Image (cartoon, helix red, strand yellow):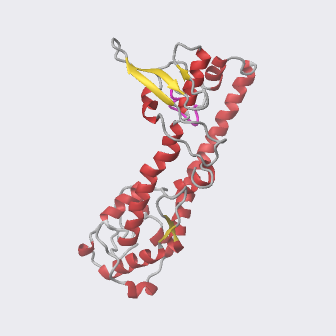
């Protein structure tokens, strides 16, 4: 990554526009170039340093951002640094504000669906058998918040053994944290096979890996096998709550923060990264506030 920050530090005091330098440019967020007159390049178009008509102002901008963004302590455990400092705080607040717009819309949609689902349950006289769970709570419900419908193999078609096999096969046998043993279940192991005639990828057995270390198969009772599949589905939290932030958010944030310290807002790479990082710094704030226990677990 080309470093643009080395020139212009002596002119920082003459060029301070904190919100503009800290937050992404509007043109970047819509993946479009346009003249916004916000940097040394008065046209606002993407440009390399050697082609900028006002390299002095560009250098000052980069130096100011380098000073204003600080590598702060990680959020959600010991992962990537998190933006801090005057500009870092402005940037994370901006991302949280953008996230809040979506949050309000989604919450309103969910409230509509909850009211409809509660009415359906009352009309049914309550949930009396297992099938009511799928038919009353999910069939033709949640249209406002999930217009494409629920995933059949996970909610409404939960009785079919092979429905979630491909989804879950790679999630087995991960260790859970020992920080609070009573809070977390053991990570189960699932075994699959390819049917010699249909070639379907099917579950063979689920091993609980705790206490009596029971092994369940599709030959067990319907409720026993359903319990085993529910235990195995808990392993998905390893992906959705742990692997996902590390493999996506932490890595993209680290690259973007390096760019914030070294590139102009009009550098072509910065424009691409700003687009990819739309409200990106809200993820770990939300995760720490709502999704994770202290220490990142």
Looking at the image, residue 169 sits to the left or right of residue 96; the answer is left
Residue span colored magenta: 143-152
Residue pictured at 47% horizontal, 27% vertical: 190
Residue 82 spot, x, y in % from top left: 50, 63
Residue 43 spot, x, y in % from top left: 33, 70
- Quadrant of the rendered image containing residue 228: top right
Looking at the image, residue 86 sits to the left or right of residue 202; the answer is right
Looking at the image, residue 101 sits to the left or right of residue 247; the answer is right
Residue 24 spot, x, y in % from top left: 44, 64
Evaluate whether residue 8 shows in this view. yes
Residue pictured at 59% horizontal, 13% vertical: 221
- Quadrant of the rendered image containing residue 62: bottom left
Looking at the image, residue 142 sits to the left or right of residue 255; the answer is right
Taking the view exactly as shown, the residue that stands out farthest to the front is: 212
Residue 257 spot, x, y in % from top left: 42, 65
Evaluate whether residue 27 shows in this view. no
Q: How many labels does the image show?
A: 0
Is residue 144 covered in magenta? yes
- Quadrant of the rendered image containing residue 21: bottom left
Q: Nearer the viewer, residue 185 or 287?
A: 185
Q: In this view, does 200 lie above or below 105?
A: above
Majority secondary structure in the magenta region: loop
Q: Which of 210 and 73 is in front in this view?
A: 210
Taking the view exactly as shown, the residue that stands out farthest to the bottom is: 10
Q: Nearer the viewer, residue 26 or 189?
A: 189
């Amino acid at each position: 990554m080309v470093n643009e920050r080395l020139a212009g530090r002596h002119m920082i005091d003459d060029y301070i526009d904190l919100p503009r330098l800290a937050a992404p440019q509007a043109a970047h967020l819509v993946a479009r170039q346009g003249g916004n007159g916000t940097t040394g390049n008065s046209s606002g178009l993407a440009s390399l340093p050697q082609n900028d008509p006002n390299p002095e102002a560009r250098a000052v901008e980069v130096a100011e951002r380098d000073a204003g963004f600080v590598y702060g302590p990680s959020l959600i455990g010991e992962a990537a640094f998190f933006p801090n400092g005057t500009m870092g705080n402005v940037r994370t607040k901006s991302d949280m504000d953008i996230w809040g717009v979506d949050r309000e819309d989604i919450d309103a949609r969910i409230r509509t669906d909850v009211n409809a689902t509660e009415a359906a349950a009352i009309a049914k006289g309550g949930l009396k058998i297992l099938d009511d769970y799928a038919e009353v709570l999910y069939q033709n419900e949640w249209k406002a918040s999930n217009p494409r419908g629920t995933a059949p193999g996970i909610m409404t078609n939960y009785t079919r053994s092979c429905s979630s096999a491909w989804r879950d096969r790679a999630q087995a046998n991960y260790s859970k944290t020992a920080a609070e043993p009573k809070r977390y279940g053991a990570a189960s192991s699932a075994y699959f096979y390819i049917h010699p005639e249909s070639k379907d990828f099917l579950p063979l057995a689920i091993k609980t890996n705790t206490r009596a270390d029971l092994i369940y198969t599709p030959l067990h009772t319907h409720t026993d096998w359903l319990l085993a599949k529910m235990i195995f589905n808990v392993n998905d939290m390893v992906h959705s709550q742990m692997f996902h932030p590390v493999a996506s958010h932490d890595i993209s944030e680290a690259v973007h923060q390096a760019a914030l310290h070294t590139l102009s807002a009009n550098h072509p790479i910065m424009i691409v990264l700003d687009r990819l990082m739309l409200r990106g710094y809200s993820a770990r704030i939300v995760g720490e506030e709502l999704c994770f226990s202290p220490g990142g677990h």
